[in-house]
Image (cartoon, rainbow, N blue to C red):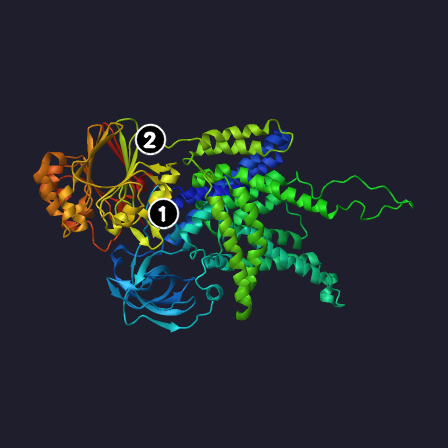
Amino acid sequence: MRAVLIGFAAGAALLQTQATLPSASAGVAALLLTTWLWLWRGWLRRRAVRLGLHAEAALRCAASLLAGGVIGFFWAAWMAQRVLTPQLALGDEGRDFTLVGTIDNLPYSFDQGVRFNFAVERVLNGARNAVPPHISLGWYAGFRDQVTEVGDVQPGERWQLTVRLQRPHGNANPYGFDYEVWLLEQGLRATGYVRPAQSNRRLDGFVFSAGNLIEHTRALLRARIQAALPDKPYAGVIVALVVGDQRGIDQSDWNVFNRTGIGHLISISGLHITMVAGLFALAAFYLWRHSFFTRAQLPLLLPAQKVAALVGATVALLYVLLAGFGVPAQRTLYMLMVVAAALWSNRIASVTQVLCSALGVVVLIDPWAVLWPGFWLSFGAVATILYATVGRVALRPARPPRAAQGDGHVSPDADRPSRRERLWHALHAGAHTQYAVTFGLVPLTMLLFAQVSVVSPLANAVAIPLISLVVTPLALAGSMLPAPLAAPVLGLAHLLVEWLAVCLQWFSGLRYAVWSAPTPPFWLFCWATCGTIWLLAPRGWPVRWLGLATWIPLLAAEPSHPAPGRMTVTVFDVGQGMALLIETSHHRLLYDTGPAYAPTSNAGNRVILPYLKARGIGALDGMIVTHSDIDHSGGALTVLDGMRVDWVLSSLPDQHPIAGAARQHVHCAAGQRWTWDGVRFEMLHPLPASYADAALKPNARGCTLKITAGGKAMLLAADIEAAQEAALLQRDRASLRADVLLAPHHGSGTSSTPAFLQAVHPRTAVFQVGYRNRYHHPKPEVYDRYGQLHIERLRTDQTGALMLDFGDTIDIAAYRQAHARYWYGR
């Protein structure tokens, strides 16, 4: 059964790598194959003597894995098809719908408004099936520069709203967060925003259902915590520990938590669930065993162990529901459920059976769980602990037998360890477990995050007991106590988190707190994993330390780079904005930094830095910020704060925050030239004298750069408009010739004049635009103009990120094509 469950999870994971879903005929063939495999498995069991026990066991295991894999693959495909079927028609994108439905989750409020999920019940101005049953909405205080009132939406309320929708779409970048598959996992098949309308109103205060009741409870607990901890810096951490809502934690705090390796504790983790369930189970066991201090003799009616198991599983379920049903919480819940079921059925379940059962249930309910790091870290950590401890760590320290007393009787407490010995044994077991987890997860952590926290063992040694045994119980108790008592209890929990944060910031600030390297290829990950298994083998295994040698290529890898004289350009998909990474043999330049999406969210921390860190790039030689528009400069401060940038070239005034944050800031000006590794860089615009003209718009001073490598050139034209294009033509028409053109001003109607395009004469044009952006870039007439000149047109809203390799030829790869998935382009 364990092999079937592992195969089931592997099959579901394989489905998530497919560009298309399998057909119905393939499903029928798979059903026949699975039946044949199961019959063949039974035939193998009957032929065990003839084949030999070892061969028979191996073949049966292979048949079970394959059968489980086929079932998992097609189960995940059926689940995907079921969720993908209700979708918004292409023609309905941008149309206003008036909907009646309920608030379906815990809303998230921010400075500009609120975001929430909406369960659609009726469509007042269209067919019911025109709108998917579950959608994600934003209600913003500012709309087209107008101030609008945002409704006080709460979970379970029924509202009538006028909304404008679009199909699921997210930025598609290497090593980036896949928003589209996240929406698919949540069952959200359209996104949009609430339009200003007189008809927007609350219809019912609360609509009862189990889901609404849970979300309403979470909202009440969050409100109590926020009221007790107004304006406290770590109130978001307390909320996360009680209801699992992590959205109130600042990005700067997450950076510290992740660098110190304790991010798994800042939520309702498996450790917290086990601790809380264990405490309630222990209390139930004690009270039931003593019949609640009555003469009822309850253990004769039902054993105390079964009562404790039932209470623990029930408390775990309630806590997991508060957590929002995350993967680590699910894994712990299902493991506890399996243990409770085994105890109630009087069957002994091995730890591997428990783990595999939890694995199968998680993937059965949520086949997309295999796509997220939490899934692999959660099950990987438990599997590592089991491998490194089960059967190796004694339950208590061994002691020599005591001598008998004078009457020949040995005291029953003679062999019981002393308190000091029990404490030492507990510390030893804890240290061994931490050692196993720290070393065992190194390859997986490098594969998922391209870094490993060196200070994690020390930080976790402080954080685990404090968060799990003190802060979490205080937070839970404080959130449920009456208001006069809640404030001091929650205040104490917050004070302890503040003290912990000071310690973690010191750990995080150490020079070698984190070891970074490029994301390894899968074969290297497998090699390092085999070495780690060797390293954690039982005592007596030959030369276990040799396992560390497999880490050398994993941790010492260097970022890839083009050959001398060549260059690569990565055009990021940042939505409506501009950001490109230019790489030569030994240098890297970032041209613009994309937009700001929210006060704490921008292309720097959402797209650029994750990509650079996954590539193992720890520094940039230069950064160009073409002008001050937020869609070009929105991520600059984040990038400057996140890594070393030697210099910044921009058209920004010297008093601009970006100029002040730069190690060295220089105004870009026509005539600037430099060469890196055989690649020539030339600044064509603006003229130095333009900085004296205060009347010029920022677009008019956009830093325009031409890069030439191997006889091929690319022109990056920022947001220059027709007047600047004409000036460039007049100054030096020949210098504009390029093979690839970054479309000026995203293809706006004020740029890309025919004369300019004829002078550049590009083979390919790249439009960095957002999906259904409010400016309608690129303008249809401008886009057609490129087509009439037989210029290949590439749009990042359709292709995702673009990778251009310049050499004797120009090779272009589109991320959505190279990384095709069945949920793209639906």
Q: Position of residue 270 (x, y in %)?
A: 55, 51
From the viewer's perspective, tell me whether residue 542 is left or right of residue 121. right
> Would you place residue 494 above or below residue 637 in this image?
below
User: What amino acid is at disc 2?
Assistant: His
Task: For mark 2, give the secondary structure.
Answer: loop
- The answer to whether any part of residue 740 appears in the image is yes
Q: Residue at x 45, y 60 (%)?
A: 232
| Disc 1 packing (10 Å; few <14; some 14–19; many ≥20) | some
Left or right? Give the position of 384 relative to 200: right
Give the image location of residue 553, x and y in percent: 45, 29
Which corner quadrant of the image does residue 248 belong to? Answer: bottom left
- Mark closest to the chain's N terminus, 1 or 2: 2
Residue 556 image point, x, y percent: 44, 30
> Can residue 71 be seen in the rendering of this structure?
no
Could you tell me how many numbered marks the image carries? 2
Residue hosting label 1: 605
Q: Secondary structure at mark 1?
A: helix
Q: Nearer the viewer, residue 318 or 465?
A: 465
Amino acid type, callout 1: Asn
Query: Which residue position is annotated with label 2?
Result: 561
